Image (cartoon, grey):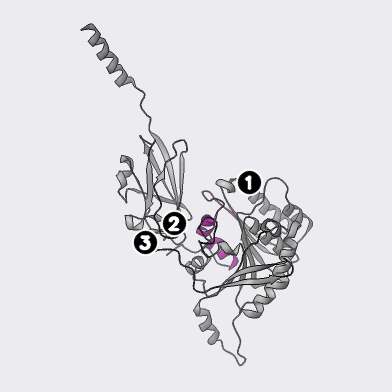
């Protein structure tokens, strides 16, 4: 009898004093695909009680930045938590570029911040390639010593109608601005991108109601991308290719304006570096450039020497940005400092810099903010995102 009582007391003490898992609060960040309407309601759901056991419209998330939603959730049992994001139903769940729903995301217990990168929605269907995209393979460049693939996004048919309606005794074509964009293989087609996400340039222009107002010339990068995108290496040859070979050919074959005021450059990462360098040294030919997640660091780099030792012949307009997570974490300090350096060197130039707290160094994050740099290049205020 005494032995039974002792065992009973041991069992009770073990039950009542066994260490219990303490509740922990996690912040969930969901980054929306480009085109998600600003009034959309975004929901978090999952396999635990706090996440409604997969009810698709469980926890409403709050918009905290451009195409970025957040929800703070206190969880008791978070070791095996799985979760998803929807727009209120399973027909509207998060999906990849080809409209295939993502597998369940697993919570990482030692990370208080959980970030979900959403490329598409199931009900939107697969990402469609713009019909007005023209691909030109085998454009020969003597300066680069290779053939280059071009991806040219034409203005939509409204521009053709405007050409026919152009008044005057002499029949003329309306000349449009043109943006020369680096890493052309990543701009329009998710199948070509290394991570199956593209910039969605055509969709961004349509959201801005500017699809009839500009030509986009995407230039595929080659096997010597890192050398061609840095002026101190082969970047000077790449700039000569742009100015002496590609630009004259584009102006001869398409209704684009040759004026510097209508000629712009754009790129990301090292593509941003060559865009800014080319603008800085050839401001008589180009007037604006946009550099997304530009690869400048705290330590001195060749672009710093180029900026320090040269002045733009005419004032220029430059857009710079950076994320604050992943690879872009390295640019939190360096990009704003680089923007200040540009402004100090050329006070009459317009330098704009912006940071995006939850964005990384990748195509999907460049796509979801693309209306901002495009608006800068096309002299527009940032539009309200609406599908």
- Residue 97: x percent and y percent? 45, 59
- The outermost residue toward the right is 309
Name the residue tied to disc 2. Answer: 96
Q: Residue at x 36, y 35 (%)?
A: 77
Which of the two discs, 3 and 2, labels the residue nearer the N terminus? 2
Whether residue 41 sits left or right of residue 354 in the image: it is left
Q: Is residue 89 above or below residue 74?
A: below
Q: Would you call the spot at circle 3 few (<14 residues within 10 Å), some (14-19), or many (20 or more)?
A: some
Q: Which residue is mark 1?
A: 333
**Distance between the alpha carbons at the discs numbered 1 and 2:** 32 Å
User: Residue at left 31%, top 19%?
Assistant: 14
Q: Nearer the viewer, mark 1 or mark 3?
A: 3
Judging by the rendered image, the residue that carries numbered circle 3 is 123
Label whose residue precedes the other's in the sequence (1 or 3): 3
Would you identify the image quadrant in which residue 381 lies?
Answer: bottom right
Q: Nearer the viewer, mark 3 or mark 2?
A: 2
From what the image shows, is residue 289 above or below residue 305?
Answer: below
Residue 116 in the image: state x and y as whole percent. Answer: 45, 49
Residue 247, image x and y in percent? 68, 73
Q: Earlier in the sequence, mark 1 or mark 2?
A: 2
Tell me the distance, in whole angstroms, between the alpha carbons under discs 3 and 2. 11 Å
133 vs 251, left or right, is left
Q: Secondary structure at mark 1?
A: loop
Q: Is residue 114 above or below residue 280?
A: above
136 vs 54, nearest the viewer: 136
Residue 85 visible somewhere in the drawing? yes
**In front: 298, or 126?**
126
- What range of the chain is rendered magenta? 353-382
Residues under labels 1 and 3: Cα distance?
39 Å
Residue 373 falls within the magenta-colored stretch: yes
């Amino acid at each position: 009898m005494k032995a039974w009582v002792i065992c009973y007391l041991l069992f009770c003490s073990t039950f009542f004093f066994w260490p219990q898992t303490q509740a922990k609060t996690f912040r969930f960040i969901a980054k929306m695909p480009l085109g998600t309407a600003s009034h959309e309601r975004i929901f978090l759901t999952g396999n635990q009680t706090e996440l409604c056991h997969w009810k698709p419209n469980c926890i409403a998330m709050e918009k905290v930045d451009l195409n970025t939603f957040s929800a703070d959730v206190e969880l008791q049992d978070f070791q095996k938590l799985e979760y998803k994001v929807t727009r209120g139903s399973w027909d509207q769940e998060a999906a990849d570029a080809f409209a295939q729903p993502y597998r369940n995301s697993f919570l990482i217990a030692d990370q208080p911040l959980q970030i979900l990168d959403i490329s598409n929605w199931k009900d939107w269907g697969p990402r469609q390639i713009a019909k007005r995209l023209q691909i030109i393979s085998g454009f020969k460049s003597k300066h680069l010593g290779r053939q280059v693939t071009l991806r040219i996004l034409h203005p939509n048919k409204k521009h053709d109608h405007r050409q026919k309606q152009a008044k005057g005794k002499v029949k003329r074509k309306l000349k449009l601005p043109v943006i020369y964009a680096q890493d052309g293989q990543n701009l329009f087609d998710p199948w070509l991108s290394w991570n199956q996400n593209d910039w969605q340039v055509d969709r961004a222009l349509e959201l801005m109601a500017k699809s009839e107002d500009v030509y986009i010339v995407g230039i595929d990068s080659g096997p010597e991308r890192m050398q061609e995108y840095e002026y101190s290496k082969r970047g000077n040859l790449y700039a000569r290719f742009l100015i002496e070979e590609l630009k004259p050919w584009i102006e001869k074959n398409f209704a684009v304006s040759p004026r510097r005021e209508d000629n712009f450059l754009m790129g990301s990462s090292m593509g941003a570096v060559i865009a800014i360098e080319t603008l800085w040294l050839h401001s008589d030919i180009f007037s604006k450039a946009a550099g997304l997640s530009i690869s400048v660091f705290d330590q001195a780099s060749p672009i710093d020497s180029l900026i320090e030792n040269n002045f733009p012949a005419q004032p220029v307009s430059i857009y710079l940005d950076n994320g604050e997570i992943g690879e872009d974490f390295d640019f939190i300090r360096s990009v704003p400092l680089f923007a200040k350096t540009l402004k100090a060197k050329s006070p009459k130039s317009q330098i704009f810099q912006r940071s995006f707290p939850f964005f990384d160094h990748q195509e999907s994050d460049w796509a979801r903010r693309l209306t901002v740099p495009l608006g800068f290049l096309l002299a527009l205020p940032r539009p309200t995102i609406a599908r």
